[in-house]
Amino acid sequence: MKHIQVNDLTVRQRNRFKKEILLQDLKLTVRHGENVSIFGRKKTETEALIDCLVGMKKPISGEITIGKHTMTSLNEEEIADVRRNEIGIISARVPLIQEYSVERNLNINNLISKKQKDIQEELMPLFHYFNVENKRKEKVQHLTTAEQETVRIIRALLAKPSILMMEAPSHVDGLQKLIHYAWGRQLTFLYTTEDWERAKLAHGMLHLKDGRLYEG
């Protein structure tokens, strides 16, 4: 079953002098439960693709389908609902609050949603799996880059998404653990990277170059 489907996606970006094509007639298919990497040297291209997939950027043309939802046909409220309920986004562009503890950061979405549920039973297995039990009470600003990335991973998983999207993973061990976690639970996992070795860890790999996707 196709979980992510992109057809003929074209995205342009205006700079000071002209409109630059970031993505051109791009096609992408990721099936349910697959994990796929997209290797690309240009951050502007990989970020544009993720932004389009999660509905944060409007393409000039093309169609994006996430599960049963045609994202390019939805309004902003509907797109936000899909993001909130079906997509886990792991990105340094979605910041943690540095002055808060790890647990407080992870509780923020719970407080915003007003569900007021106790998430400790869900947190502890994730802390254990990603080996950060001893960091629960620490302020984020005292964590290493790898540990902060792990907190962002846990934050995304707490929402129980069916699709995970990750930008530029910096920690190989954490990425391997996440690939294993997603595969074991049949979560669809798509990540972008500028690092060839990290790209090869996925079960499927695509190369984004000059706005187009190529196999391998």
Image (cartoon, rainbow, N blue to C red):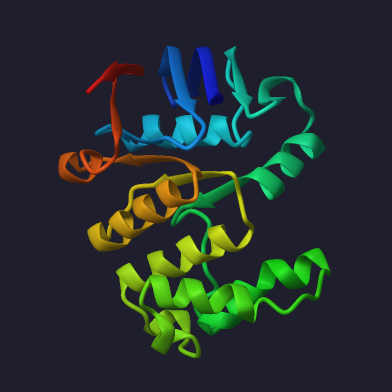
Q: Position of residue 29 (x, y in %)?
A: 46, 21
Q: Is residue 35 above or below residue 113?
A: above
Q: Position of residue 162 (x, y in %)?
A: 59, 44
Q: Is residue 183 above or below residue 34?
A: below
Image side of residue 111 versus residue 148, left or right: right
Q: Residue at x 82, y 69 (%)?
A: 115
Q: Residue at x 47, y 31 (%)?
A: 48
Q: Residue at x 79, y 29 (%)?
A: 75
Residue at the extreme left: 197
In front of the other: 107 or 43: 107
Q: Is residue 74 above or below residue 171?
A: above
Image side of residue 111 versus residue 66, left or right: right
Q: Position of residue 49 (x, y in %)?
A: 46, 30
Q: Position of residue 149 (x, y in %)?
A: 39, 64
In front of the other: 128 or 109: 128
Q: Quadrant of the N terminus?
A: top right
Q: Residue at x 20, y 39 (%)?
A: 200
The answer to whether residue 20 is visible is: no
Q: Quadrant of the C terminus?
A: top left
Number of numbered discs visible in the structure rendering: 0
In front of the other: 80 or 205: 205
The answer to whether residue 134 is visible is: yes
Q: Is residue 184 above or below residue 123?
A: above
